[in-house]
Image (tube, rainbow, N blue to C red):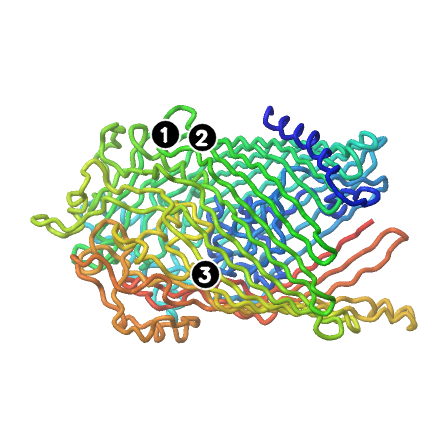
Amino acid sequence: MRVLCAIFLIAAGLLPAQSTETSEPTGPPPEIESETPDPETPAVDLDASRTDLNLLGAVDAESGEARRNENVQIDLIDNNVLKEMNKRVGVTATIVDQFNPRSDYFGAEFGGSPTSPSALPFVGGRSIHGSLFETHDNSIFRARSFFQVGDVQPARTNEYGFDVTLPVWRGASFLLNGQQTRARGQVNGNVLVPKADERTALATDPETRLKVQAMLDKFPAEAPNRTDINERALNTNAPQFIDNDVLGGTLYQSLGERDKLTLRYAFTAQNVQAFQLIAGQNPDSRTKNHDARMTWTRSWSPSMETDLTAGFDRVGSILKADESAFGPTVMFSGVFNDLGPGANIPIDRAVNVFRYAANARKVYARHSLTAGAEVWRRQVNGDESNANRGQFSFRNDFGNTAIENIRLGLASTFIGTIGNTNRGFRQWDMQYYLGDEWRLHPKLSLNIGVRYVPVTAPTEIHGQANLGYHCDCNNVAPRFGFAWRPSDKWGVIRAAYGVQYGDIAPVTYSASRFNAPYSNRIRVPAPDFVHPLGLTTPEVDPNGRGTYFDFSPDLVMPYEHQYNFSWERAVYRDWRLNLGYVGSRAMKIVTLWYFNRAEVVPGIPQITATQNDRRADKRYFDVRRSLNGAQAYYDAAKVTLLSPVRNGFSLETSYWFSKAIDLGANYTSTASGADALAGRGQDQYDVHSDMKGVSDFDQPHSWMTRITWRSPGLQRQPRWLRSMFGGWEAFAVTLVKTGTPFTVQSGSDAPGYGNLDGSGSDRPNIDDPSILGRKVKHPDTSAARLPRSAFSFIQPTDIRGNIGRNTFRRDGIQNINAALSRTWTVASEARLTFRAESNNVLNRPQFAEPGFQLTSPNFGQITNTLNDGRSFRFTARLAF
């Protein structure tokens, strides 16, 4: 609080004195323009919380996004929803006209939102107004997805809510809003299951045979019914329930002519009973968010304003295995669908953030100055997993196929974590900023600012984690830009440059919870399937061998140089053309590298069972080091054409050409979970040359068009004609994009397939380079376009395969969404709006990538779609 008071006193005491430095009379001082939102905007918006809280169900239909195929499972934690969207929909090249010094824009060039200031805006008003709405989506209005067998199963979604603003006492108004979503659906999808002659155990040991049979019995009893695409493909359905609850209230209190107080509390919750196409496949999840905030705003003069803010934010996340789960995670190398949930389940995490902020704005002469600070105290508490339930991996090994090993109970690897993994971490995040908007000339303005963003290293409250890195305290982020109008004919030219900082995610540093002496992650090659750790679970040996999660001593936050340029001008009869470029160079991206891998050692057989004997440091298995090990590059040229409204029509169309390249990690990386696997090189040497490739969301070509038409009011026509046909508004959006890339993998680290270093990131050799870069986008042609014969496995003593990362592309996007709406005046101050929307109007499937593991029988076969079939939903809203 002393820091906040100091910032506040500096802003209040020094900034007014600067106003006397102007050298020319300017008349009355300019006034502060308040940052006032739309009074009908709710305090909580589920769509806005979609990526922050990892919420299911939201669709950005107006940007051309199709409904997600729910059978593509997501663990609702960290930033997994954002990463799934980037791979499925891709990113949107976004040109930032001006960098606000109060916000950070890390990742904004991809369409992400900048960070929001903690301060709450003030909305006055003495009238009663609000709205009620209901949205309904039903399976009777849905089309079958491409692979679906049989009719669309019964499903429905109801979304309803309200917001109302009321005067409560003198100088005060209260906004109350609430919203609920109840989705009761059937998820349809393809899974790979054993054939009828593969459903019995072959193990000779009675105890092993019972456990293998119990494992095989977790697959659905139905036989494969899509043998046209894969001999083991079963199209089936499973129920999924999603409940969203939102409640928020905001009090706006005027304390006189100068002072205003805003208090807000918002609650958001989501419960998901996940679909289980295979028993226990996905975790059930529960997310709860509490957000309480208070802002005091004071107007010292018409040109001087300050605000002080205090707040508390809490996000609780629980992900747990379904009761039908087998127990340990079992991975089958793509032969069958894995038995889940993933090795990171269960998770019980609570993140508390205490926020304190001060800001001052001063307008004088040609300058608009902003200065302030925010200080956050972050608490991360809970228990998380890294194979705490155990994880078996079956693959081609021991001279057998993967299916033979599954039925014999011969796993290649077992991984398990034992001990106490409950931890509590504490950390300070800070940001100090200063900015000036300087109007040099009526046709030229400059925007200058700087941010200082120090972050302390996390500490564990019980002393059970030693991270080894320190305060990242030299993060200075300058930014500047300009807007220039050379003449009315030539329009406006804008440019902006800034350094933007990301963060080190809590899930990154909390991996220290799996280190000895309090817990240990054990890796066993060629384990006993029944007793992989022996007859009894061992106690944690403080000096025992285990996987070690290491942190580079110079680990710091990633940052990027971001630059934007745009030129907007009128071209013909109020048509406007915008030509732009956006680029970024991201540095020090956090990634995870695997060290202490098994190597070729003379005299030791090069087989799976000797992996741990061939590691250089016998104290550990893998050494997994979080470090600033990646860079990323993004460039995009964008052209946008906007029409004026003519006869009710308006048009906006954009095309952008882009390139995204990285060294194995991008701006969303947390160096954990799927990110850790995706950023893992084939071997531990020269990772950059092995991992350099286009980013997971790279899409060279993108085109989006929005068309709106409003029918004439028909004022001179009979009333019944006006009521039926007048005042309708039609909207359509088309989105066309290149498909995102994928990587071909070997599928096994065993002799004859991989390099036997204990990390399953091997890639094969490419024998026919002419197929590189191919688009593999339809199940009828996928096997021919990605032929198995074009690849070969490496030898056991080879370091790596010669094929690169992300060298092929999946199906792209060609989607159309449309809507039709009409508003009626039902009373002097009440309006009723009806809206019908269709998503994926043409019912075009967006196919997923084919099987990409060369050892798997489904290699080159497409068995899923990323989007859902055509659907309709209907909304009624009463505003008063």
Of the 4 image quadrants, the one containing the N terminus is top right
Q: In the visual, does 525 lie left or right of 21?
A: left
Q: Residue 452 in the image: state x and y as whole percent.
A: 53, 38
- Could you tell me which secondary element the residue under label 1 belongs to? loop
Q: Which one is in front in this view, the residue at disc 1 or the one at disc 3?
A: 3
Give whichever of discs 2 and 3 has the lower sequence position: 2
Label at residue 425: 2
Amino acid carrying label 1: it is Ala
Q: Name the image quarter holding residue 710.
A: bottom right
Q: CA distance from mark 1 to mark 3?
A: 36 Å
Tell me residue 806's x, y (percent). Answer: 37, 63
The residue at 40%/36% (across/down) is 510
Residue under pointer 1 = 465
Mark 2: few/some/many CA within 10 Å (<14, 14-19, 20+): many
Tell me if I can see residue 707 in this picture: no
- Amino acid type shown at disc 3: Ala
Q: Are marks 1 and 2 in contact (CB under 8 Å)?
A: yes
Residue bearing the label numbered 3: 660
State yes or no: discs 1 and 3 in contact (Cβ < 8 Å). Answer: no
